[in-house]
Structure formats: structure tokens, C-alpha cells
Amino acid sequence: MYDNNTHTDQRYIAKSSFKGFGGKRVSFALALIKKAFSTDKLILSHINLLLFGKIVKRLKPSAKIILWAHGIEVWRAIPNWKKKFLQEKSEIWAVSNYTKHQLIERHQIPSANIKVLNNTIDPFYKVSEDFSKPSNLLERYQIKPNDFVLFTLTRLSATEHAKNYDLVINAVKALKDRLPQLIYVIGGKADEQEQIRLTQLIEKHKLTESVKIIGFIEEREIEAHYHLADCFVLPSKKEGFGIVLIEAAACGCQVIGGNVDGSTDALLNGELGQIVAPDSEVEIIEAIQKAIHNTQHQPKLQQELTLQDFGFERYIDKVSCLIAKSVN
């Protein structure tokens, strides 16, 4: 509805199979209505598009409406008509068991209406079997080859502190005297207010040499930053799933995530990484210590386990199965 045809990424889809309406919602709605009569299944990528599902269902009652449910957009209150439509007129593909449970508890959606379809590793995401730390990044950030590097990649916002990277900074402070080789790299775009807050926190803890806020990372360099890290840490409590967790694991990283959201699906309930109470600084400290002293970690095995569950070919099979089983 908001994209233009020029936005088509032909790695994923042919231009002939994509139509963008550039924000012209009336044109989008008219095109959808025209398609409604020949539609057997309509897949909606966001709950804000549910009105169009209702229109199609009205015009063609036999059409199957499928909604993709990600995270906070369906965890919060929704209008009663949407709730009723989801309860009676649609199927939902939730990206995690946590999101499924939120739909059941908050909106009384029958469990049978909800299928869990975990997210996947991007098919064009480069996964290397070379697990050595990139020398150019070691030099760029002035990190020694034997330093133990924690890494977080997320948006840094003054209005959203559910990612708990500030608690990781506190944990580094608590561990620094005993583990001087500990380095924490925080990547992701930060708003000005949050940049100031974190800088002040780092200065207060006298961690300017140990905690590095590096800002936005170009897509072509993301994989290299995962390889720079010994452990990816994101003790979040608002992840619908947690793509960065499986990206890091696919690069062989040890991973620490939260235990109260979709991160548990991404980490296979602890098989792919440690899960901690995200608000517990004690548990975060203990998990970091465990990662540092883990001499049994095998990056190649970590990668294989991740791709086995979240690789794109497996995802295709899951989607195909769900579409085939979807009945009116």
C-alpha cells in the first residue's frame, strides 16, 4: 500500500508479481476489491490491514483470510470488531509461541485458529564458516584479538528501554575488575536523547574504553560484526521473535536472550543460547560469566543447529504446509 514499484527487490520477487500503490489507499482498496472475487486465500502482513480482509470476506465469504501476527501490534488492545473477526473469520500465523499466547490471553482467540510460524534467516544473508574475528573491525574499534566481545544490535530509543542494553552496561561494570578483557559493542541507530543518556552512563561507570556505541551498521557489514563477537546479548522483553538472535547464532555466536517474549522461540528454549530474566542484572552477569568460561562452545555446531531450524528451505516447507492445510 505504501511502497512504490521502484522499491521492488527483484532478489525476492519479480516486478511482474509486485504492485505498489505509493500511499494511494483508495487505489489500493479498489484493486483489492477487484481481486477479491478471484481470491481463495488472502494473507495480510499486519493487523492494520484487517479491514481489507473484512471487505474481501464480505464480497467472497468462501475466501480464507490469514493474518500474520508479529509482536506488540497484536499484544495491545484492539477494537472489538477486529477481535471478533479474528475469533470467527480468520486464521492467524504467529511468529512465536509467545505471540500466540498473547492472542489467546488478551483477545480470546481460539488456540485452533493460531498456527506458529517462526521467522527465518534471510535467504540472501551470507553465512560464513570462517569464524575468525575480522581484523579490520578489531582495528577500527581498537579491540585486541583475545578480548571477549559482547555485541548487541538493536534500535536505541529514549522511549523504549525494553531491550535492557543498559543492564548489560551495568553488568560489564560489575565484571570489569575481574575480567579486564571484557568489551561491549552496541550497534544500531540511536536517537539523540538516548545517545546522550548512554554516553553519560558509560562515563559514570568509567567504561569509555570497554563499552563502544558504534551507531548504525551497514547491511553488508552486519555478518562481520557477529563474527567480531564472542557472545551476542539482547535480554529483551518485547521481541515478537528476535531475528538478530538467530542471525548471531547462524554466525556461530554464543547468545543470551530474554525468557519472557519471543526470544525463547528463537533460542529454542535454551538449546541455541542462554535465556535469562531480562530485568535481572544478576542473571545477566551470571550468563556473561558462563559464556566467558564456556570452553565447549562449537561455532560450527551452533551454525548447523540454527540453519536446521531456521534456514530458508525449512521455512518454505513450513509455509507450503500451512497453506495446504488452511481450509475454510
Image: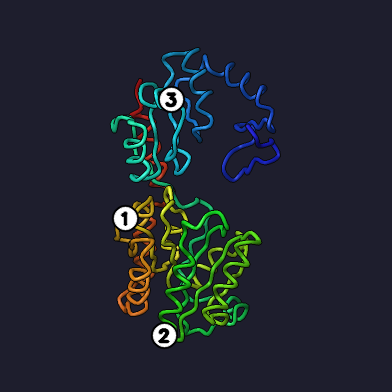
Residue 10 rendering spot, x and y as whole percentages: 62, 43
- The nearer-to-camera label among 1 and 3 is 3
Q: Secondary structure at mark 1?
A: helix
Q: Is residue 208 above or below residue 185?
A: below
Q: Indicate which disc, 1 or 3, sits on the residue closer to the N terminus.
A: 3
Q: Which mark is residue 268?
A: 1
Residue 309 visible in image: no
**Mark 2 or mark 1: which is in front?**
2
| Most foreground residue, 62 or 76 | 76
> Which quadrant: the C terminus?
top left
Residue 80 x, y percent position in the rendering: 43, 25
From the image, tell me which residue sits under label 2: 179
Distance CA(mark 2)–CA(mark 3): 54 Å
Identify the residue position indicated by label 3 in the image: 80
Residue 101: x percent and y percent?
32, 41
Question: Please, is residue 7 above or below residue 170 in the view?
Answer: above
Nearer-N-terminus badge (2/3)? 3
The reply to whether dot 1 and dot 3 touch (C-beta < 8 Å) is no
Q: CA distance from mark 2 to mark 1?
A: 29 Å
Q: Amino acid at mark 2?
A: Leu
Camera-near label (2 vs 3) is: 3
- The kind of residue on which mark 1 rests is Leu
Q: Amino acid at mark 3?
A: Asn
What residue is drawn where x is 52% and y is 54%?
Answer: 160
Q: CA distance from mark 1 to mark 3?
A: 34 Å
Give the camera-side residue of 262 and 65. Answer: 262
Q: Secondary structure at mark 2?
A: loop
Mark 2 neighbour density, 10 Å: few (under 14) some (14–19) many (20 or more): some
